[in-house]
Amino acid sequence: MKANKLPEKLKALRTLAGLTQKEVGQFLNRSESLISYVEKGERNLEAEDVFKLAKLFKVSPDYFFDTQPKNASVVSLFRADAGADSGVNDFMDYVKNELDKENE
């Protein structure tokens, strides 16, 4: 069975993208309180909503479950936009390391 990492990964992606729970809820046509409950691990989303989140954050739906190397998709998402700016790459390496520490 796949481990559900949706609560922590949704919150991490949402925060990195600078979105509020209300904005994510509006994107999914769901309430802000549902997103809050999901991030606390108290509620689940429908599969359709997980696919929509994956498109929003440009990650695989599997990213929300324990099936990939930790944080690979988050770093890839931002590196794709980083171009040749080494400062952004350094920052993304820092973010990846911090997320890895949290997941240990």
Image (cartoon, rainbow, N blue to C red):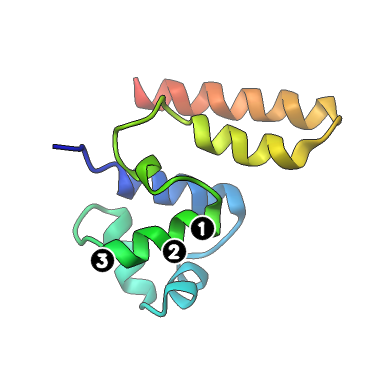
> Residue 40 location, x and y as percent?
27, 53
Name the disc covering residue 55, or none: 1
55 lies above or below 6: below
State yes or no: discs 3 and 1 in contact (Cβ < 8 Å): no
Q: Residue at x 63, y 24 (%)?
A: 94
81 lies above or below 38: above
> Between marks 2 and 1, how big is the CA–CA gap?
5 Å
Residue under pointer 3: 46
Name which residue type carries label 2: Lys
> Between marks 2 and 3, how big is the CA–CA gap?
10 Å
Q: Residue at x 53, y 60 (%)?
A: 56
> Between marks 3 and 1, how big is the CA–CA gap?
15 Å
Q: Secondary structure at mark 1?
A: helix
Name which residue type carries label 1: Lys
Residue 25 occupies quadrant: bottom left
State yes or no: discs 2 and 1 in contact (Cβ < 8 Å): yes
Residue 44 occupies quadrant: bottom left
Q: Secondary structure at mark 3?
A: loop
Q: Residue at x 32, y 55 (%)?
A: 39
Name which residue type carries label 3: Glu
Name the disc covering residue 52, or none: 2
Q: Which of disc 3 and disc 2 is earlier in sequence?
A: 3
